[in-house]
Image (cartoon, grey):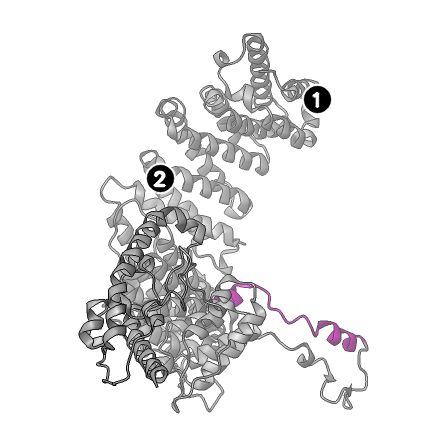
Amino acid sequence: MSLPPELRFLCAQLSSTPPTGLPRLTPSLLRNVLRCRAPLSNAAGNAAKADTSASSVLVHKLKTQLSTLLNGKSQEGRLVAVVLIKAVVEVGGWEVLRGAESWVRGLLALLGKPDNAASKELCIIALTKIYCMTHQYPTLIREITTPTLPTFVTSCLNLISNPSSKVVDVPSSLVETVFRSFTMLLPRHTTIYRPFTSQIRLAIKPFIAPTLEDGLIVTSSLKESARDLVVILHQTVPKGAGGEEWSKAVRGLVKNIHVTADNVFRAVVEDWESTAGYVGEPVNVNQELSGGGANADDLPRWTGIAAGVERLTGLLEMLAEYFRSETSTPVSTPLGAIMDAVVRMLSIALSSSDSSSRQGSARLHPAIDRDERDGLWCGMPQIYVAALELVNAVAERMQEGFMPIAQGIFDQLVWVYPFGKSTPEFRLVTYVIVAKVLLHIGQSFDRTQAGKLGSIIRSCCKDLQPLDPSCRGDGVEEDSGKQSRHNANQNADTFLQNKQNAIEVRLDETDLVVAARKLLSLLLSHIPQEFLDISLRSSIERTAILSHNKDAMLSSILNPFVGKNGKALASVLPHLTQAFGSDQMVEILLRPRMPLLPSVGARLPTNDAIHEESEDEDMELHTKLDPIKGNLNEHNTLIDEHAVSEYPGLGPAVHTSSHDAALGPINFDLPSFKPVAAHNSATMDETMLEPNLNHPRQPIGMEDTRMEDESSDEESAHLNMSLDGMDSDSE
């Protein structure tokens, strides 16, 4: 094995370049490290004798240079050292990892130095990688992980919860890095993290369900990382009690949701009644709307309807996270209490100015001012979406266990759908949940339940139908083709824009479109089609054609619709063929093929013996027929039923050689031969006794395609025809 030049060049660059100039060379240095896998990962004894000394010297020199940079005074040098140490450990594997204890202690010391946040983030990532790589080596766990991991946890907690500074001063990326590191390491080292559980809960509290009142700008990824860490904290309890701790946390979160909803929903008089035994406390409507911060374990305090909606939405999202994460032990799920909270969120009807609406709006509390009510109406779509996302998470985790609650969720969803359908996020999660409901109980729907889907079906079709560019309301009347009279100042570019976009009618593959496409197919395959209105069925098929939805068109063909008059709707097969003519599934529907018949060449080797046997049988048969022909011609004897049945192979209607008979035996039952009427002039011609003259033998290997149950009737019919022919000849 020859040493790669990258290793020598890497050592030369590190020794010749000052630490302040190394950051700009970091990409080149990383590429060289990745190309040095062989000398870094192979043991010294595995290398060739000629290269052993040179390899050991260069690898030792590289490690020494990295240690010098890590412990040096230059921040730039420490930054580059952290990056290269992580790369060298990943490339070298166990050979480098077993000697990385000094690097680990140097990285831990760097967390306490006044370096920038980027260096500390990279340091945390490098340490996390080293700890994860030691999982498969118990010896390295005892030597490296167990002695140093408590120091790592303490240093990270000090970074994100320093009492001398506010949380807002800590970069969110650094906090997120710490949370993700803890999430990766805690399940493998629960006993080490157990003493730090209370500190971790205190550190992540502001990021679980933040509000605008907290003065923090929390990104969605930071909230996700904090919630992931909260969910797995139950694993730090003593062995065997993790499931109970998980259930306790879920029940406490459900209660917190109800307490927050008591304050947020104080502007309306709720008709909801708890089925899980929750009894809310009375809310003072004369005080300012607020909540939270009641004790040390509670989330930060919030004030105002906007902050209340955010807190309630965050708690629902936090509860959904408990179902998205796996647990290490079996848990008891309070499904009844969770669904009770979901129904409460979906029982608030938005105020509507539409007098024709069939559903009444929520009753308003007279003591609440208009501003708070308007804030609640603006925030209800967010609450709807969060509650439905919780239902979706439960359905994903429960799988078949979701079936008992699917009907109740469906009824509540179709009731609240008119109030939130104007929000795209609400329609998206609705389509996803309805698809899951149809997969579980859609086949059992009756006409009433199928009729409840009318509004959802129309919205689904509307979301999938591409807009006609000629009808975008650009101030141009496409019907007349002339400039609008009521607006003389037209933009001339709108005419060109309409013509250019007239062909571009395909939909963007957004999450909403993908969910609607999947639901459209299930509406045809998982609902009894006789219970759908013909207008809805026509709208679904029209949308499937316009949106080029192959699955929906296939479902339409496989589940035809028959109207009340007994007539079926026209098939969409021509449209499917036009759009997906080269698809294999469409080819199967268009031209279903019979199984291929074996070729002659393939049957010859196996049929030689049968062919020879058939020739012997033919010779023996002709020998027996000669005296019979003589007797028939001499005595002019009629053929009766018993004469024919004695020699079943004589029937000329079968046209099957003895070879074919050997391949596929044919039953000649006596009831299939009808009695032949006696005629004085009835005689049998030689052509009837030698059917092979008119019907030559089929080639060997060809299968007789006649059905066995038709052979007897055909034999009888041909026999009658032949006898009639003999009568005419005798006359």
The single residue placed furthest to the front in the displayed view is: 634
Label number found at residue 17: 1
Q: Is 585 above or below relative to 329?
A: below
Q: Is 55 above or below relative to 390?
A: above
What residue type is disc 2 on? Pro
The answer to whether any part of residue 293 appears in the image is: no
The crowd level at tag 1 (other Cα within 10 Å; few <14, some 14-19, many 20+) is few
Magenta-drawn stretch contains 460: no
What residue type is disc 1 on? Thr
Left or right: 242, with 534 as reference point: left
Residue 644 image point, x, y percent = 22, 72
Q: Secondary structure at mark 2?
A: helix
Q: Who's the residue at 31% across and 41% down the image?
A: 236
**Image: magenta residue range:** 493-516
Whole-number angstrom distance, CA of label 1 to CA of label 2: 42 Å
* Count of numbered tags: 2
Camera-side residue: 495 or 677? 677
Q: Who's the residue at 46% across and 29% down the image?
A: 130
Q: Do labels 1 and 2 touch, CB within 8 Å?
A: no
Q: Earlier in the sequence, mark 1 or mark 2?
A: 1
Q: Secondary structure at mark 1?
A: loop
**Residue behind mark 2:** 187
Residue 217 image point, x, y percent = 54, 54
Residue 320 image point, x, y percent = 38, 58
